[in-house]
Amino acid sequence: MDEQGIEFKAIVSNGLKLGASLAMAEHIQWLRWMFPLEEEAFAKHGARRDRLTKAIMDEHTVAREKSGAKQHFVDALLTLQEKYDLSEDTIIGLLWDMITAGMDTTAVSVEWAIAELIKNPRVQEKAQEELDRVIGFNRVMTESDFPNLPDLQCVAKEALRLHPPTPLMLPHKATANVKIGGYDVPKGSNVHVNVWALARDPAMWKDPLQFRPERFLEEDIDMKGHDFRLLPFGAGRQVCPGAQLGINLVQSMLGHLLHHFQWTPPEGVKADEIDMSENPGLVTFMQTPLEAVPIPQLPAQLYKRVAVVM
């Protein structure tokens, strides 16, 4: 990596470390005199992050003046800045929302989905039969195929239900004194929503611990904040700004992996022996990283990488 890449990686790593801290004073305000928050560390991190982001934005501004805007999220935001009166802070915030919320969360969602499909070969076979029927064996899947792949969409939904990448979402702050379920929540309190528990509630779901994507064919359940049983992206004004992008990425990665390969456990390991325990943290990684064997299913020429000029 170049110098900018090394700095980017360091900022992401430090941001995740600060974001995952469980300082008691963040949740019980009157204890802050005993447990002061790391205000200085947050300020330094924010300044370092903003310096790098502004440098990247300046690079894109210069490049756009020379050769015009390209199909890039930074260019899109800068092009729309004046039209929608976007401040520099808003652009920086949106960029880092996409970066910090869209990398490991997508990867871990696909890893959980593949693990569940290996443990449930019937579901894997059904999804692959649909892919083979709709796409065939002479091309690869594209996003335009999504509407014709309901089984694939249901597999992605079920994976996000059972294994939401951020089980407690990101912390929200109460802007006023409110009462929820008989509990008083003082203004300024940090609030965590346990979407992991909501998605496994037997009062809301039939066989909640079973990986059964067909449930989403039996009932149309929205997962972008309109149905509180399924909230992998949050809800309301604080809903994830990249929700649709996240859904498309998970479906795309899953679709390609399932269309290109059949997935089995390693030799000597039974499917029901795969460790499905979770590693605690801001994002729920598998405690034991998944090991699986991919068996190619398509003609050799479809596995060649093709360079795409953005």
Image: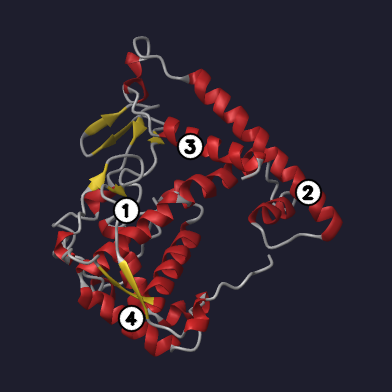
| In this rendering, position of residue 128 left or right of residue 98 | left
In the picture as drawn, the residue positioned furthest to the top comes out as 33
Label 3, label 1: how far apart the Cα atoms are? 21 Å
Q: Secondary structure at mark 1?
A: loop
When asked about the image quadrant of residue 23, the answer is top left
Q: Secondary structure at mark 4?
A: helix
Question: Mark 3 is on which residue type?
Answer: Ser
| Quadrant of the image containing the N terminus | top right
Q: Which residue is mark 4?
A: 128
| Residue at 44%, 37% in the rendered image | 16
Residue wearing tag 2: 61
Q: Is residue 30 visible?
A: yes
Q: Residue 164 shows which numbered tag?
A: 1
Name the amino acid type tagged 4. Answer: Gln
The residue that mark 3 highlights is 13
Circle nearer the N terminus (1, 2): 2
Q: Compute the Cα span from label 4 to label 2.
A: 44 Å
